[in-house]
Image (spheres, rainbow, N blue to C red):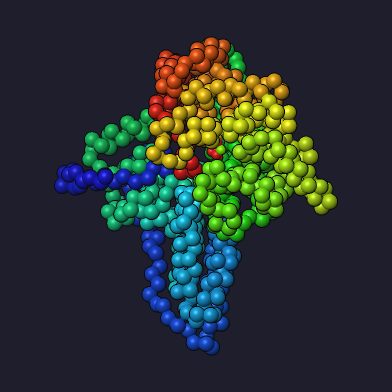
Amino acid sequence: MNEVTEKQGEMTTRLKGIAVSPGIIIGKARLVDRSRVKILYQYLISEESVSKEAERFKRALEAAKEQIIAYKNRMPDQIKQHSFILDTHLMIMEDTMFLNATIDAILNEKINAEWALMKSVQHIRQLFSQIDDEYLRERVADVEQVAERILRNLAGRKDENTLHFSDRVIIVAHELSPADTSAIDIGKVMGFITDVGGRTSHAAIIAQSLKIPAVVGLETVTNRVQDGNLLIVDGASGEVFINPEDDLIIEYQEKQLQHEQYESRIIRLSHLPAESLDGQLIELRANIEFLEEVTAAKDLGAEGIGLYRTEYHYLRGLALPTENELFEDYKQVAEILSPAPVVIRTLDLGGDRFSPDLAHAKQANPALGLRAIRFCLKEPEVFKTQLKAILRASAFGNVQMMFPMISGLTEILDTKEILGEVMADLDRAGMAYNRNIETGVMIEVPSAVAVADILAKHVDFFSIGTNDLIQYALAIDRINEHVAFMYQPFHPAILRMIRQVIKAAKDAGIRVSVCGEMAGDPLSAFILLGLGITNLSMAPWSIPMVKNLIRSISMKEARTDVRRIMQLDTATKVRNFAYAKIESLNQDGGEKDLSVRSRRENLRPLARKGR
Ligand code: PEP
Ligand code: MG
């Protein structure tokens, strides 16, 4: 809610937007005009002029490509890993739905280039609006930004590269494109706030990498702020104050100091080993969904990627990814991390993740339908393309492969058969790959728990996917708000299943880790550690908290506590026991803020990115 209070004749305005990159800044506003190009003219073209009009469009498109390439070449080093965002813009310009549809509209409907372009965008926008996934829905912004750039070129507007300032400022803009954000000079830009954008917009992701605070989705901030106004921006709460009162400035200066101290503790922790008081080392890895998260994961102390979710390339609404596109992506992740491991999980489509390009998309009961490995075994060509890309990437780092939603041995055997065929194809083509690539399965279906001893003989590792295991074991749809209160990670049934899987893995001598949300919450992580898990994979930002926990417990004591926990008969009793235990710990010299998530009542997995 937005409020206004008075300050010596001036008004303090409080706005609340979407917090996307933490940190507090107090500084002067600089309005950046990124207003949209209005299409004033929609007109018909004569038969003789249509090809010229198509040429005019192609010239504007070519100019747009050159501009993007120039931005890419100028990108500062610390965000070089995001250059693929600009590649995405280049790819959109080549996409059939975008390029051919626009040219066809000019030629067949005989309409001007601007009109034809907006028709294509409208069509793509409509397709994207049907996607359930927040991250992918927001990707339509990329298409709009590309169109905007071409429209500017059609209108003969100059490409502005105005994000250079003489003083340190807070940028205030309607929207920032990837090209804008990649041109940000962090020496001069303290942070930014925008009218539009979401949690997973590229601007947000880049702000996190640059470690500058940002708040987006403020709706009308560009109308409320004037150049030079004093601003307070809280990138953790999403609050923005325009012309703040003196008391507020003092309060936020204090908060700024606390945040800086908190950050330095996190940084200090990220360089320390995840070692318990009695000397046991725990391996902490990160779960990621995009190549661009790798650097942040490493900075936060991840010792590898324990779960690389690979659906993004299939869900973006354009054509299915090619083997080479996937290979380039996986290879980069492998190279950045090498020699640390990256576990690439094969496609987990279905459930709450649909691709508009693939058949079998909408199903009546998707979580129990043709999802993940079932879908891949039904569509071997799609599967083989991904397997080839993963195998080829394995020549460039420590790549491991993991299969989701395995419910029994037959699926593993069928999968291995396809993997064998793909290896033979690569051999014939003389392509390099790691023939001994380690393969593992996610244990996230109750039947897989029951036969974990059988499965363990056929794979190199297990990774317990507690998000789905809870969903399937307790019959609670993980994305259905009506039953959210029954989604109970601390349910004794879940803990027993996890214990059973750990035992099966240990008996067979294979590794076992946990990569569901339970791994990233200090309360449940404590139980997992006490059950004997020594490898946890979680959202990058959870790593410092869990590391803090590990460094404050004795593993011997945790095992004793968890033996008692396993005697408790309800989820509430389990949770309360673990809560009391965590509260009593002397974490990092008494600082409990790093375990703040453990106060959450319910550990629901947030179905997708942007949670
Ligand atoms: C899980 O199910 O616990 C898991 C990690 O996978 P996802 O959340 O992608 O289904
Ligand atoms: Mg899962």
Q: Quadrant of ligand 1?
A: top right
Q: Is residue 104 above or below residue 279?
A: below
Residue, x 25% and y 42% (percent of image)? 244
* Residue furthest out toward the front: 364
Q: Examine the rendering and report whether any part of residue 257 can be seen.
A: yes
Q: Residue furthest left?
A: 9
Count of numbered marks: 0
| Residue 208 on image: x %, y % | 47, 42
Q: Quadrant of the N terminus?
A: top left
- Does the rendering let one see residue 158? no
Q: Position of residue 501 (x, y in %)?
A: 62, 25
Looking at the picture, how far across and down is residue 227, in whole percent? 31, 54
Residue 217 placement, left or right of 609: left
- Is residue 395 shown left or right of residue 347? right
Question: What residue lies at 40% left-to-right and 32% top-to-bottom?
Answer: 485
Residue at position x 47%, y 39% in the image: 477
Question: Against 576, is 291 above or below?
Answer: below
Q: Quadrant of the C terminus?
A: top left
Asked if 73 appears above or below 489 in the picture, the reply is below
Place residue 260 in its image quadrant: top left
Percent from the top left, x then y, of residue 265? 46, 26
Comparing 406 with 6, the one in front is: 406
**Residue closer to the observer: 166 or 104:** 104
What residue sits 43% from the left and 55% below the top?
176
